[in-house]
Amino acid sequence: MNRFWYSLFFYVCTPLLLLRLWRRSKQAPAYKKRIAERFARQLPAFKKGGVWLHAVSVGESIAAAPVVKALQASYPNLPITITCMTPTGSERIQAMFGDSVQHCYLPYDLPSCAKRFLQAVQPKLAIVMETELWPNHIHHCYKMQIPVVLANARLSARSAKGYAKFPKLVKPMLQHLSLIAVQTQTEAERFLALGATEAQVQVTGSIKFDLSIAPEILSRAQQLRESWQAQQRLVWIAGSTHQGEDEQLLAAHQQLLTDRPDALLILVPRHPERFDAVFALCQAQKMATQRRSTQALVDNTHQVLLGDTMGEMLLLYACADMAFVGGSLVEHGGHNLLEPAALGKPVLSGKHIFNFLDIAEQLLEAGDLLQVEDSQQLAQVLLMLAENPAKAQHMREAGFSVLHNNQGALQRLMDAVAQVKSF
């Protein structure tokens, strides 16, 4: 398949895209809004000539935050336009940056939409976070002589295998990129195998290691636990959970309660459209549950705090004694293991962490990651850590050492960007 057939296929499938938006809006009404933006219509009145950065959803938006701040510091007079694909990503971008950036949804990768969008923004540089590759957007950037940087790039073996099925589409797309700044040498080799050139690919590391924790997050977390009167309680968190995991996590918590009846679980679903369903699940299992969105205090009768707010993931991680990172008991591939590690938490996960293999391997080797296979094993590990503070402290120190040893990726990325920018 080349770009012509890809584009034709995309046009034919456009009604299905609209149907998908409609179906998703049943659970998340925000999907019904700003649909015109997805077709490069009714775009904001952009200031032209700056940097366009694309971050597909919440995780990539958070990862992009230090890049955006570095760009604002280095090029304060240039407008920065941030695009994403999801309402939750949009909310996070607006919460983090407000009016300091321009923002809209990225239009679908149809040739006409990509062209209209780029003509509206007219960026001097495009930065795409991680592995969100869209052939028509990249093609029109190339035609308009806009350098495109794939930043903090990651490419799993499974994704590389998928891309390899379409060499006539993928190879020209990759060769139109000005820079592919990858996280690891393994991923560099995968991009090279798909057709990228050695001149394009640089190993800069993962900017996720450059995560810094604001002191006010730690002080707010301490105040929250005090307000819950939970200083002596065992508090653990399951963050960024997916469908199929919550039942297992609640089962682990039920088992933990038999030994530690004062234990509190902070349960944070990854997607806001699942908040009500997970609350109903907690009630069905007769778990005394408080919703964070009500701002009501947790008391010693509550067994679960449902984290049904946006933008509080780090704060809620900071409130816990140990952290399970979701998307890993089901075959989703896991989420960012470094956020709880940076907060000094022993980190737990399931076995399905293929999206973060390099980070997971380093944490495992250092000793700040324990993997579990099921709810029973998770409950056992939680109890072991609660009863073995020396082990928990060793894990905290190991996490800090992994972060410290890998920092500097952001500066390496910015140095590489400076070599390809056209301003």
Image (tube, rainbow, N blue to C red):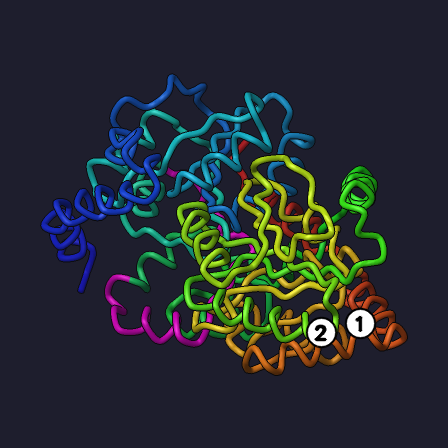
Q: Residue 382 carries which label?
A: 2
Q: Residue 353 carries which label?
A: none
Q: Quadrant of residue 152?
A: bottom right
Q: In which quarter of the image is residue 404?
A: bottom right
In the image, residue 155 lies in the stretch drawn in magenta = yes
Image position, residue 276 (x, y; %): 43, 47
Quadrant (top left, top right, bottom left, bottom right) of the N terminus: bottom left
Quadrant (top left, top right, bottom left, bottom right) of the C terminus: top right
**Start and end of the magenta stretch?**
145-169
Q: Is mark 1 on a helix, strand or loop?
A: helix
User: Image point 53% across, 26% down: which residue?
Assistant: 101
Q: Mark 1 points at which residue?
A: 386
User: Image point 32% across, 36% down: which residue?
Assistant: 29
Q: Which residue lies furthest to the right in this view?
A: 390
In front of the other: 265 or 339: 265
**Does the image show residue 361?**
yes
User: Image point 45% across, 29% down: which residue?
Assistant: 103
In front of the other: 142 or 217: 217
Residue 321 is left or right of residue 17, and the answer is right
Image position, residue 102 (x, y; %): 48, 25
Badge 1 amino acid: Ala
In the image, residue 158 lies in the stretch drawn in magenta = yes
User: Image point 77% across, 79% down: which residue?
Assistant: 384
